[in-house]
Structure formats: C-alpha cells, structure tokens
Amino acid sequence: MTTMTEASVREFKMPDVGEGLTEAEILKWYVQPGDTVTDGQVVCEVETAKAAVELPIPYDGVVRELRFAEGTTVDVGTAIITVDVSGGAAPAAEPAPAAEPVPAAEPEEKPQARQPVLVGYGVAASSTKRRPRKGTEPTAAETAVQAAVQRELNGHGHAVAAQPAPEALAVERARPLAKPPVRKLAKDLGVDLATVTPSGPEGVITREDVHAAVAAAPAAGPVAVPEQAPAAPAAAPVASYDGPRETRVPIKGVRKATAAAMVGSAFTAPHVTEFVTVDVTRTMKLVEELKQDKDLQGLRVNPLLLIAKALLVAIKRNPDINASWDEANQEIVLKHYVNLGIAAATPRGLIVPNIKDAHARTLPQLAESLGELVATARDGRTSPGAMQGGTVTITNVGVFGIDTGTPILNPGEAAILAVGAIKLQPWVHKGKVKPRQVTTLALSFDHRLVDGELGSKVLADIAAILEQPKRLITWG
C-alpha cells in the first residue's frame, strides 16, 4: 500500500494569495481524486478576506486526495490537495478519505453557487493520522447496525439503547448518514438529522427527508397561539409558515474583513461629513454629448465618470486632502499620486478596488478603467492587489435611489465622497423656478488631517465643476 509520505506524492499548500492573509475559504473544487492534472491547471477557487482567487497546481500528476471540503476555511500553509507525480493512476479501491464528502461527483446534490458547505470532514491541519478506510461493501456488523437503526426509526421515531452493537450504534446516532449538501440544508432549516427518518439507500438521509421533517414539525407539538387568541387573524400565517424563523450566516471572507475595517475606521478616525446640493443639469447634458464622441465609443460614459474627474481636479487644487495618518511614526503622509477607489457592492460584501494613478489618466483612459473595474467586481474576480493602496474613495449611493449618506472612511484614507441620486427637481435658475437635474454630495474626512476649511474647499470645487463642467478644462 502506498503512503502519503512517499516522494512521488506532492502536497500543495494553501498559498498567501494576498498581502499578509492568514486564511482562505475553499469555494469550489474543479478536480476530484483520480483526475489527471497538469502544471498550471486551476484546481480550486478560494475566497480570501479580499477577493475570490483561482489556484493553479504546480505539478503534473494524478490527484490523490482533497484534504478539505468546499466551504471549509483553511489556514495559509496547510496542505489542501495531494498529487501523485509518479505518472501512475490513483488506486481505484483506495479512495482518499477527504474525497467522500465532496459533492461534485453527483451534480444533483451540488449546493448553489458560492454557498459554503458547512461540514466537518477533511483532515485537520494538526492531525498526523489518517482515518480508517472503508471498503466498497459494508461489513456484516455495519449492515446489522444500519438495519437496527432503520427498524427503530420506522417503528418509534428514535433509536433505543439496547442494540446488538451498542458502541457502533452510538457512532451512527452521533453522525447520521447524509451527504454534505444535505447536512448544510438541515443546518440552514434548523433540523436535527438524528430525528430524520432516512429513505435513501443504506439509510442515507436525502433532501426530501429533510424537507419532510420540516413539513411535519408544526404537528409535532401543540400550537399555543390559537388557544391564547383564537380570533386573532395573524395566527393563521404563523401556524402555516413552513420556513425557518431565522437563518444564521457565518461571518467570514470579504464581509468579515470589511466589518473589521469599518469598525476600526469609525472608532479611530474622527469623522466629519459636509453636504452640498448642486444643479448638475449641464453635467448630464455633457454626458449625453460624450456618449456620441468617437474617442469614447465603446467605453463606460456616465455621470460617475465626470464626478470622478471633478474629484481628481479638486484634489489637484487642494492636494493636502490626499493624505494618510501614520499613527506608529506620528506622521502625516502626503500622497503625490491618486489611487481612486470606487466602492462596489458584490454578493460577497462591499469591496473598494482602486484605479492606480488615476490623476494621470485622460478622460477616455479613466472611462476605460472604470468599465474594467466595475466588470471585474461584478464577476467577483477583483484581485487583492486592486484593493490595496487606495488614497481617496467615491461611493455612489444614488444608484439605489438614495439622496445622500454619511460614508465611513476607507481605512488609511483621509476622504470619501458619497454621490446621491440625480433627480429632476424645482430649482431657481437665472431668477426663475425651473425643473433641473439636482443631486446631493457628501464628503466625509478625517478631522485629524483635514480641517473644516480644507474639506469645504474640496467639496465646493467638486460642486462648482459639476455645475459648470467647462471648469474641467480651465481648472484641470
């Protein structure tokens, strides 16, 4: 029998795909034990605190073992997959122990995309022992135990203590037979698998069994609400509701990192927010004209493009706002470049990728960069490097129909601009009340670095440019 200590078997360890990251969650395996892989082939997708990243294997060979199931968070430096590089095929009768819970071999049991499979399978990082391997057929003792459990479940709804093999039965009762997606479904619905009657082969619990247990749950005990208030019409929906009352979602990945960063920012930097409402009718007209410009054909041209350009011009006129506070060295760090962050809401949480050296880009170049940034974030492929080194940020809450907000600073930055919804409103224009395109801007800044005068100048410059966009030429 071959062992994992042989020189022909190589371990691939979870790399640090970002700067100083300590862990990553396995989102999806693209290979299974027995598959042939080549150097550079992507074998899995993982999510760090900053982004989702595909990992290529650096070996040619045959996959021997997947150490962790999808949905498992693994420390950097821990072996996650082993590959036999000798050129031989993996032995069919000796599957790797971690491969059993991975659901990719049965498509009908796959969880939905990017939903973590919360199971406890896989080889622990600190373990040096391997689990005993199971044969392809159950032993006589196992068959007897499963039959006994099935009889008791069918007859009484629970297992009794007196069984032919009490020690083995205790193991079975402690971990009912079910595949990882089914375990996750049960966990999400609040169902104890030990109380579910299995209908699958060899006593395996299926999805249908879990749903049946949920449907039967209201009848398992008396409903007190109708007795206390029989005439209350609200009691009927409560009694007929067959879904979970609560859902608990683990805090990890991007959302965990964002939460920590926002708490740190809110309670470290003294925030001040100023607001201005501005007539952007001329800016909206310019956007429509630029969409017809041949130099901008095929590029992302929208109000955000001109707002970003206005912010860059305002920073050029007031460079002290483009700075950071170095607490360790007790220094203010003035940045002579602008890495412009754009806050993006994604299914994994809020991320803030930035456009490097945005101050040096022409309007077409800025439009191209904005388009690439948004498309990459939407697809969940933003790299960790794209979210590092930002100096100032824009968050566009207007896309959600919100007038304005008080944004929290991105850690390490001195200012963030919130853009509200652009709406047609009555406005005094040239002495008369007319319908004009109006929006509200909010600028939050770190009061350790930026006083009221500097913050007001920056916000006033942005508003002035959006009101008279020709200032982009005269001021820029």
Image: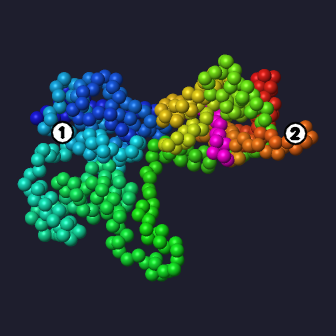
Q: Nearer the viewer, residue 195 or 269?
A: 195
Give the crowd class for mark 1: few <14, some 14-19, many >=20 residues within 10 Å. some
Q: Is residue 279 left or right of residue 17?
A: right
Q: Position of residue 418 (x, y in %)?
A: 68, 41
The quarter in which the N terminus is drawn is top left
Does residue 450 show up?
yes
Q: Position of residue 161 (x, y in %)?
A: 16, 69
- Amino acid on which disc 2 is placed: His
The residue drawn where x is 34% and y is 42% is 70
Give the residue number, with chain letter if any, for mark 2.
429
Give the residue number, with chain letter if any, for mark 1.
95
**Residue placed furthest toward the right:** 431
In this view, 414 is above or below 289? below
Q: Nearer the viewer, mark 1 or mark 2?
A: 2
The residue drawn where x is 34% and y is 57% is 186
- Residue 396 is covered by the magenta coloring: yes
Residue stretch rendered in magenta on the structure: 387-402
Q: Nearer the viewer, residue 20 or 327?
A: 20
Q: Point out the tag, 1 or 2, that comes first from the N-terminus.
A: 1
Q: Is residue 210 left or right of residue 199?
A: right
